[in-house]
Image (cartoon, rainbow, N blue to C red):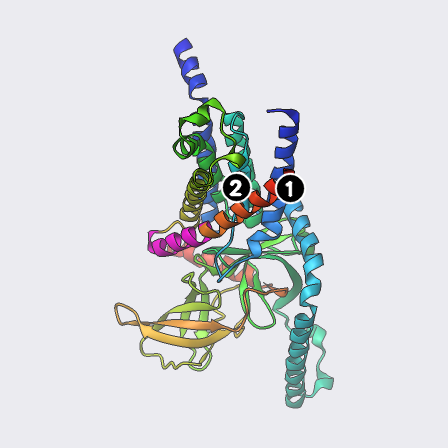
């Protein structure tokens, strides 16, 4: 017994190291799994507070650019509204009774990283603002990511610049589907895989979200085709996409909630259960 | 360790964490190169200080950075590792004389000092990036990140040490 105690005392540093190192590696492995309940996340009271404090200061530096973007978006929305008015008689329409599948929230990005392989953003909205896991996040220019963790007042977002992100996307012209992933090389370029060989594609084509997932509505802008090649089996295209979004300078974003997501997922699960 | 040493280390710990998360994590030179100056705490920790305490403090230091970065435990693991390996690095950088407490990191011969800093920085970066990237496919990215971020960190650490040495003397 004494021997054992002496052994522990003699090697206490090594043991301490082993224990702490194991804890760190365990935390790392856990963080590589897509939103399990993480213990360590920047969506908490202290870090969120500090990031908000920093953003209150640095926000002023980008005000000019932000205003410019908002103006452009307003312009685009106005144009769409005008087109809409032309098509239907607006007097008969009451917007409160329109079927409204998607709800939008606004949020501010208080922390953004894009230099790692698994990038996350932190937003200043959380459960108190009825934000939940698995909601889509977009900016005025295009897609940003998916909410992966929520605390009372903050939320973290798994960016599209994350090797674990897979987002359903399609070619705007031909409607062929593929999934979006990132090869970590350039924060402005993402990859679209699984586009079948028979699809007609050319450089400069627009890529939008596919609408096959319950997260994003159909037709949210993603980017344009930069170049493409056939993959090793020569059955699918491997497409590089220039993002419309500048992922390195995000300030204001929109969070999208699909009110029917729950219903769709439950139905799909019920069908799967029957098949098993 | 004297009382003033303890105070200096506490202040250094807090300052380095804030500097790292508020400023240095956003440098992103050429898209992916960031300096990790906060390990200066481990480098400058008193040579006669308690080794167990250093390992524990390094773990905490790394964990704080991880919480801000949403990176799981990669910084914690890397910091714990270099804190544990530090006595070995000290021995081969400064020779056996360090064991008799005759060496002061700030006053040692520049070449020996650089060996010491560079070894710790590269080990830290290698462990950190391999855990963060976590895939054999991106081995080139791992080596590139380690090399460039490492050089950046070393330059920054040496500059900081020169700057603060001048002030105190």
**Of callouts 2 and 1, which one flags the residue occurring earlier in the amino acid sequence?**
2
User: Is A229 positioned to the left or the right of A163 in the image?
Assistant: left
User: Is A101 positioned to the left or the right of B113 in the image?
Assistant: right
Other-residue count near label 1 (Cα within 10 Å), few / some / many at <14 / 14–19 / ≥20: few
Q: Chain of mark 2?
A: B
Other-residue count near label 2 (Cα within 10 Å), few / some / many at <14 / 14–19 / ≥20: many
Residue A98 drawn in magenta: no
The image shows residue A116 at horizontal and vertical percentages of: 47, 55
Q: Helix, strand, or loop for circle 1?
A: helix
Location of mark 1 (residue): B167
Along the line of sight, the residue nearer the viewer: A143 or B91 = B91
Work out which residue is located at the far top of the displayed protein and give it: A2
The image shows residue A145 at horizontal and vertical percentages of: 53, 62
Along the line of sight, the residue nearer the viewer: A237 or A169 = A237
Q: Chain of mark 1?
A: B
The image shows residue A168 at horizontal and vertical percentages of: 45, 67
Location of mark 2 (residue): B39
Please tell me which residue is depicted at 65% across the width and 78% down the height of the picture.
A72
Residues flagged by tags 2 and 1 on a common chain = yes
Q: Helix, strand, or loop for circle 2?
A: helix
Please tell me which residue is depicted at 56% across the width and 43% down the height of the picture.
B161
* Structural distance between the alpha carbons of marks 2 and 1: 21 Å
In the image, residue A102 sits, relative to residue A151, either above or below, namely below
Q: Is residue A133 visible?
A: no
Along the line of sight, the residue nearer the viewer: A3 or B51 = B51
Q: Would you identify the image quadrant in which residue B162 lies?
A: top right
Please tell me whether the stretch drawn in magenta is mainly helix, strand or loop.
helix
The image shows residue A134 at horizontal and vertical percentages of: 54, 57
| Quarter of the figure with the N terminus of chain A | top left
Residue B147 drawn in magenta: yes
Magenta stretch, residue numbers: B136-150
User: Is B137 positioned to the left or the right of B26 in the image?
Assistant: left
């Amino acid at each position: 017994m004494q021997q054992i105690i002496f052994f522990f005392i003699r090697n206490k540093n090594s043991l301490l190291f082993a224990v702490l190192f194991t804890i760190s590696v365990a935390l790392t492995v856990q963080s590589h799994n897509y939103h399990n309940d993480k213990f360590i996340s920047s969506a908490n009271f202290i870090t969120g507070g500090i990031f908000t404090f920093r953003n209150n200061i640095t926000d002023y530096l980008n005000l000019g650019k932000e205003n410019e973007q908002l103006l452009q978006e307003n312009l685009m929305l106005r144009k769409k509204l005008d087109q809409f008015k032309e098509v239907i008689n607006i007097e008969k329409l009451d917007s409160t009774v329109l079927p409204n599948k998607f709800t939008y929230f606004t949020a501010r990005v208080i922390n953004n990283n894009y230099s790692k392989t698994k990038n996350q953003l932190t937003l200043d909205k959380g459960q108190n603002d009825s934000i939940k896991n698995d909601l889509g996040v977009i900016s005025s220019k295009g897609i940003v990511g998916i909410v992966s963790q929520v605390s009372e007042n903050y939320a973290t977002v798994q960016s599209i610049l994350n090797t674990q992100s897979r987002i359903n996307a399609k070619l705007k012209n031909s409607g062929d589907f593929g999934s979006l992933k990132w090869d970590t090389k350039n924060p402005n370029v993402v990859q679209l895989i699984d586009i079948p060989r028979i699809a007609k594609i050319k450089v400069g084509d627009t890529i939008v979200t596919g609408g096959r997932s319950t997260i994003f509505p159909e037709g949210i802008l993603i980017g344009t085709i930069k170049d493409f090649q056939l993959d090793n089996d020569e059955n699918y295209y491997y497409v590089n996409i220039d993002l419309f979004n500048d992922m390195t300078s995000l300030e204001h974003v929109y969070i999208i909630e699909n009110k029917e997501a729950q219903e769709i997922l439950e139905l799909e699960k019920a069908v799967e259960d029957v098949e098993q | 360790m004297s009382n003033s040493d303890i105070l200096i280390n506490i202040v250094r710990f807090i300052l380095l964490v804030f500097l790292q998360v508020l400023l240095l994590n956003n440098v992103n030179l050429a898209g992916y190169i960031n300096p990790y100056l906060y390990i200066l705490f481990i480098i400058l920790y008193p040579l006669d200080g308690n080794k167990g305490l250093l390992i524990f403090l390094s773990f905490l230091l790394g964990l704080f950075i991880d919480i801000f970065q949403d990176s799981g435990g990669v910084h914690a693991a890397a910091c714990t590792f270099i804190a544990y390996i530090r006595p070995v690095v000290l021995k081969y950088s400064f020779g056996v004389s360090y064991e008799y407490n005759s060496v002061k990191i700030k006053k040692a011969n520049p070449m020996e000092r650089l060996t010491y800093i560079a070894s710790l920085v590269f080990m830290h970066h290698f462990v950190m990036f391999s855990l963060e990237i976590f895939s054999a496919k991106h081995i080139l990215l791992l080596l590139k990140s380690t090399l460039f971020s490492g050089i950046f960190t070393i330059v920054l650490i040496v500059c900081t040490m020169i700057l603060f040495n001048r002030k105190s003397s």
